[in-house]
Image (spheres, helix red, strand yellow):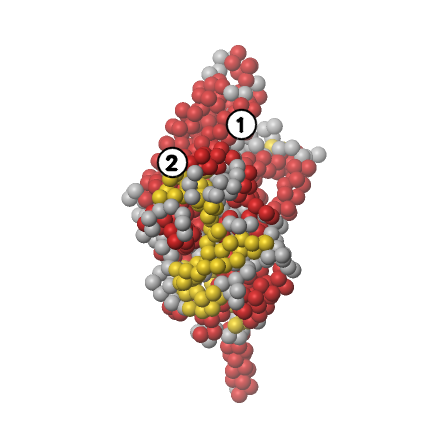
Amino acid sequence: MARLAATLLASALFIGQAAAAEPLKLGFVAPMSGAQAEYGLQMMNGMKTYMAQNGDSVAGREVEIIVKDSGGPNPDVAKRLTQELIVRDKVDFLVGYGFSPNAFAAAPLATDSETPLIIFNAATSSIPTKSPFIARVSMTLAQHAYGIAKWANGEDIKTVYTLYADYAPGRDANAQFTKIFTEGGGEIVGEIGVPLSSPDFGPYMQRIKDAKPDAIFMWFPSGELANTMLKAYRARGLDDDGIVALGTSDLVDDNSLDSMGEDAVGLITAAHYSAAHDSELNKAFVKAYDEVSGGSPRPNFMGVAAYDGLAAIYHVTEELGGDVSDGKKVMELLTGLTFESPRGPIEISAEDRDIVQNIYIRETKDTGEGLYNIEFETMPMVVDPGKD
Amino acid sequence: MPLTLPRRGLFALEILFWIALAASFFVFPDRLYLLTQILIAALFAVSLDIALGYAGILTLGHAVFFGMGAYAAGLLAKAGWAEPLTGLALAFVLCGLVAYALSVMIVRAGELTQLMVTIAVGAIVVEIANQATPITGGSDGLQGISMWPVLGAFDFDLWGKTAFVYTFVVVLALFIVVRRMLQSPYGLALKGIHGNRKRMYALGSPVEGRLRFAYAASAAIAGVAGALLAQTTEFVGLDTLSIDRSAAVLIILVLGGTGRLYGGIVGAIVYMVVHDFFADLSPEFWMFWLGLFLMAIVMIGSGGILGGLSRLVRSERS
């Protein structure tokens, strides 16, 4: 009898231990294949960098990342993968989400299952309002557009022509820039929405050149087309006419900046992160990241967002002693969380769980070790201006 | 020497096939979303089969109707009437009518012209949906759809149980209609037009009218498939209209076998399951393995999976 009791006790203890050692599961939904595969790679590297620096377990639980490929903007696929991560893999956190439609589609599932969902990129302002279980550690496009418009107001720039990709993010960027710039006394002399599919920028640039504005605000999603737009700006000689080029980090993404060459030098852009950000923490981050990625690509805003996302998750898990089963408690701790990131101080807003962070104005320079965005002005702790 | 199957055996096989599909509900209770999306892809592929496999209309723009159905059902729900069956009916009627109007252009064109026209229509519709952001949500997608319970009793749940059963019943019901339609003299006439159009003219068959009806029916069913996706995911993105989706459904149908009724369904099952398997195995490089798999299937012979099977097993009829 005593032996039976001892066996029972031993097995109970064993079960207890096994439960404590359950891995902490992160369901990671991001573009891993296709044209935007670098998004997923940046995020993956960012997470691996944090784990390399801080260990791959937290509060006694080993961190397990379950990778799911959403491809491009595929809301139905993203929703299915999210649902399976919740009901089948029983993940503790949902992370990633490169594209806004994917995040929008997943939002109701986070609410229904009370699973915390940490956005690593999707940048449409309204995303965190779609579920109380969403927190964003990346950025909003409106923050960038706000930054560059404010800066232009402070300079000798009175008239701006805007050129943007004619789909939701492009229109948002344009609307936000226009709002801030005109409120600050500037004038928009014209705007052109360019179709997203294989545009020819030449004629548009010529039209803008003829209008002789002080500056041009350009927005296209980072990648091939943004580069093409920039080339057209140079080729038509807008720079020779003294028309200043303004943009957001999409124009000079760290991921591809080095391959853009001369065309990018001298551009003024607004963003929340540059690989050249001058801080000890960032230097350590870039070094560790390079070890993970093998030196190429260098970290960009998505890498740093994933890194910070894991920092937030580690913090909350530690705080709760490893028991993150109550999504509401997790969100309570995430809300209002402030910490130092490689990009500078950040806060997950107590108001709406959106990111609050410094926006930097940078100039793209050839540092001798390649092209970098060098920050020269800081707008401290910018709250997303795009939600009204 | 191919196996020979008695005619009644073939019918029993069909019944068995559908029972197996239904049973997947119990076998894979945590994969119901995948199963639901397989069923939706299957219905979409069957709809394409009517136009492509039976009527011989070459199209690379069938996602136009899939997406139109999705937006119709989504917008109706957002406008305040979120009853699922009404959404399906709206998608069916709307897509059928639009396709019937468009079919004037399509049935008169040659094969390459058909491809061109359907691609062009697709590009226009995508851009309209992109520009009409206040209505469609543009590239952010149509959000905030919340469906009422099916028949007022079954709520759409997190596990996707309602979504699966609802989709299964709708797909089965429509499939029975399509099966009846294609096995009727009308279906035979379609096959005749596909095989030898001039001869059908000579026989006095109203070729154009038949083709236009086939195209409209095909579009109406594609619309229902889209509406099912909108209702079960409660979201509609621009991707529902995209040429990528048109191409994917074409691959699914060719993989399964065109003009064989079950080709679309078998293709959807194999394609989606293999896709899911490879994507899990290798999130970065699954496209390579999937591509290799598709090439291997094509090498086996024409007619897709069902074409290959038909060389092994024959029914008494043929």
Q: Position of residue B32 (x, y in %)?
A: 47, 51
SS for dot 1: helix
Residue in the picture at 40% in, 28% down: B98
Tell me the residue that label 1 is attached to: B115
Observer-nearest of B150 and B133: B133
Observer-nearest of A376 and B21: A376
- Tell which residue pokes out farthest to the bottom in this image: A2
Q: Position of residue A84 (x, y in %)?
A: 49, 56
Q: Residues within 10 Å of mark 1 (few under 14, many from 20)?
A: some
Q: Amino acid at mark 1?
A: Leu
Observer-nearest of B310 and A92: A92
Tell me the residue that label 2 is attached to: B91
Q: Quadrant of the N terminus of chain B?
A: top right
Q: Residues within 10 Å of mark 2 (few under 14, many from 20)?
A: many
Q: Amino acid at mark 2?
A: Ala
Task: Say yes or no: labels 1 and 2 on the same chain.
Answer: yes
Q: Is residue B163 visible?
A: no
- Tell which residue pokes out farthest to the left in this image: B80
**Which image quadrant for residue A147?**
bottom left
Q: Is residue B59 visible?
A: yes
**Residue A290 — which label?**
none
Residue in the picture at 43% in, 38% down: A212
Observer-nearest of B269 and B11: B269
Left or right: A207, with A67 as reference point: left
Residue in the picture at 42% in, 68% down: A338
